[in-house]
Amino acid sequence: MDNFRFYSPTEFIFGKDTEQEVGKRITQEQVKKVLLHYGGGSIKRSGLYDTVIASLKEAGISFVELGGVKPNPIDSLVYEGIELCKKEEIDFILAVGGGSVIDSAKAIAAGVKYDGDFWDFFDRKARVEDAIPIGTILTIPAAGSEGSTATVITKEEGNLKRGMGSDLLRPVFSIINPELTYTLPMWQTAAGIVDMISHLFERYITKSKDVILTDRLMESTLISIMEAARVILEDPENYEARATICWAGTIAHNGVLGVGREEEWSTHMLEHELSALYDMTHGAGLAVMFPAYMKYTLLEDVDRYYRLATEAFGVPHNYEHKEEVALEGIVRLMGFFVELGMPITLEEAGASREDIPKLLEKLKENQGNSFGQFVQLDLEDCRRIYELASEETNDE
């Protein structure tokens, strides 16, 4: 196990009707004025908006609103939020929504306290030194942003999708009521499940040795996610299954499963170019890219993929044919994605093999000529992975 430091100050308030506590919880922060940040009309249609407003008013909390966050959140709304916070002297942000809303809130929180352009953080020209505190009410379990350091924003000019992170951006509190996810379309539920599974894989696929504890924690989390997902497919309002998915999405990305091991985020980088170019749902893009990445890197450490196949996907042991066992694990992963209704090829996701040169061009602009920890990928490697993800080759 590698040396590590782990800091996770977020208070998680989990369970039925917990969103009603938000006003009372914010009063503990002794803030003067709150920015209520959210996405489209779903929180109003569901009644959550009214619940939050009533709770804030009952607690005597002054607030202003900024809605309009879209999937793959954009920089223009972040700039608007920064200016609004400065004008209104906002000292706390409440993000009500999924990962996109929370990511947008984090970027605003950092930008308000920075004299320059907030995009400097994403260009690696500056580090976050201060930020407005934020709280969240989660409505879409997926990105894990309710407990993580990370935020991902798309810069509209140049269509650049990039991420950055800081412990200062971890939410002060996150309210998670699994009941709020009942009305999610199954596509969003499924895409969120793929996203959280991918967060496990980005940590599981490692060259760090002697990490059996976190290996087993991730394998158990993955198995639990798949079991709960299959229940939800049949019974969308099963509370225990929804609760499992909600908490799994949080622990998959709050850092606790990655301690002591080198992480590998290449697949997220490959997918970011898909969702930037096509405005693709992040989870759908990951369902396409992860099997392709796994197939391409399998021989780098057959034993690691063998373990995943046997421990998480139930492939019988066959020590004389480890590669076949490992490949069967990837096949079973793809089969699970199909069960969820997710695409497993570029074409099924609405992408095109002909656009691979465009993807590589943006990848070079965002990541340089090479990147990766488990395997150092150059642009030719990336081209081959994108080709593996295409309809003609993904089933080879």
Image: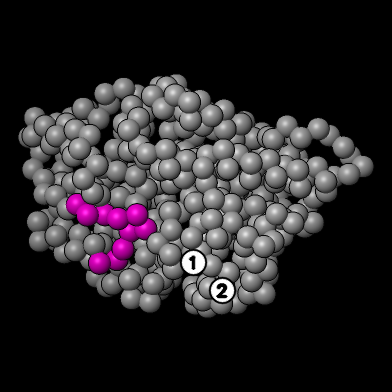
Residue 69 counted in the magenta span: yes
Q: Residue at x 57, y 43 (%)?
A: 337
Q: Which residue is mark 2?
A: 354
- Relative height, residue 360 to residue 288 (above, below): below
Q: Nearer the viewer, residue 258 or 246?
A: 246
Quarter of the image where one finds residue 243: top left
Spot the residue most to the right: 320
Give the magenta-colored segment's residue range: 67-76
Three-letter residue code for mark 2: Glu
| CB within 8 Å, label 1 to label 2 | no
Q: Residue at x 30, y 50 (%)?
A: 101
Three-letter residue code for mark 1: Glu
Viewer-side label of 1, 2: 2
Q: Position of residue 313 (x, y in %)?
A: 69, 35
Q: Which residue is mark 1?
A: 273
Quarter of the image where one finds residue 235: top left
Direction from residue 365 to residue 322 in the image, left or right: right
Q: Residue at x 68, y 40 (%)?
A: 332
Q: Position of residue 388 (x, y in %)?
A: 67, 62
Q: Secondary structure at mark 2?
A: helix
Direction from residue 384 to residue 252 in the image, left or right: left
Residue 1 counted in the magenta span: no
For label 2, count other residues whose C-alpha is less than 10 Å away and answer few (under 14), some (14-19) or many (20+): few
Colouring method of the image: one colour
For label 1, count other residues whose C-alpha is less than 10 Å away and answer few (under 14), some (14-19) or many (20+): many
Q: Earlier in the sequence, mark 1 or mark 2?
A: 1
Q: CA distance from mark 1 to mark 2?
A: 14 Å
What is the chief secondary structure element of the magenta stretch? loop
Q: Position of residue 64 (x, y in %)?
A: 11, 49
